Image (spheres, helix red, strand yellow):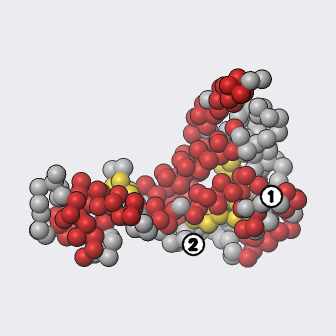
Amino acid sequence: MSTRAMLTAINREDATVPGAVAKAIPQIAQAVERIVPLLKNGGRLFYIGAGTSGRLGCVDASEMPPTYGVSSKLVQGIIAGGFGALRRSIEGAEDDAVKGAAEMQTRAIGPRDAVIGLSASGRAKYVQAALTEASKRGAFTACITCNRNSALIPLADVPIVADTGAEVVAGSTRMKAGTAQKLVLNMISTSVMVQLGRVKGNRMMDLKIKCDKLRERAARIVADEAGVDMNTALKALTDHAGSIRKSVAALQSGGLKKARV
């Protein structure tokens, strides 16, 4: 195949992923509706997976504190082989069932927690054992898999199956299956954070200002919410230690305002 034909074939297959995810929305909704009350009651959300699936879970979890201002303990990612596996492949780790169960024990998983197992094929014994142990401990369990015959399905309270079919490169589940899992993770974490009150309208009211880009984004949120100009918004953020909520509340309660430009 020419380069263009190859890229077209990949893109054509990628375009089928949203449809596969859409079919799983009822199950995704069930998972979200089970997770939210647990987190409101002091519980935690864990993603556990191997390979690409595990990396995607860790990425999603790592983005919750800066985006929504929550503790890094609220949503946690666990990957077979440990954090070294985020940077290099440790394929054999997915077969370590003992370690998968031990991860649940180490983190003292209990009835207030939710555990989502990630495995495109569902064959990862590490993930299977983790879900089994989590269930024994009374946790809510779900899985995100791309195989309609996945071994994870009977192990989860709510199985989420995005059946993406064969990959362009046979068996390379980092492609369509990985994309599907990323989409589902986005949907779960975003919906959970919205229902926890971390979003107003479609704005991230609790984002943490860690760089110039985020400072400007925070200032725009304050400016829009309070009806002030950017300079006033920036000053309010400085006065209130970077808190968007406190800045908006102060300005709306009678703080100095200027016409927004």
Q: Position of residue 84 (x, y in %)?
A: 75, 67
Q: Secondary structure at mark 2?
A: loop
| Residue occupied by mark 2 | 73
Q: Which amino acid type is marked by label 1?
A: Ser
The answer to whether residue 42 is above or below residue 47 is below
Q: Quadrant of the N terminus?
A: top right
Confirm whether residue 218 shows in the render: yes
Q: Position of residue 177 (x, y in %)?
A: 71, 41
Q: Quadrant of residue 134?
A: bottom right
User: In the drawing, does residue 151 fall left or right of residue 238?
Assistant: right
Q: Quadrant of residue 131?
A: bottom right
Q: Earlier in the sequence, mark 2 or mark 1?
A: 2
Residue at 80% from the left image edge and 58% from the top image edge: 89
Dot 1 lies on which element? loop
Q: Residue furthest front?
A: 2
Q: Residue at x 69, y 38 (%)?
A: 176
State yes or no: discs 2 and 1 in contact (Cβ < 8 Å).
Answer: no
Q: Between tags 2 and 1, which lies in front?
A: 1
* Marks 2/1: CA–CA distance: 25 Å
Name the foreground residue: 84 vs 248: 84
The residue located at (76%, 37%) in the rendering is 148
Residue under the image location 68 percent in, 48 percent down: 144
Image location (x, y in percent) of residue 244 = 31, 66
Q: Residue 170: x, y in percent?
A: 83, 35
Give the label on residue 117, or none: none
Pointer 1: residues within 10 angstroms few (<14), some, or many (20+)?
Answer: few
Query: Which numbered tag is attached to residue 89?
Result: 1
The answer to whether residue 74 is left or right of residue 208 is: right
Indicate whether 260 appears above or below 171: below
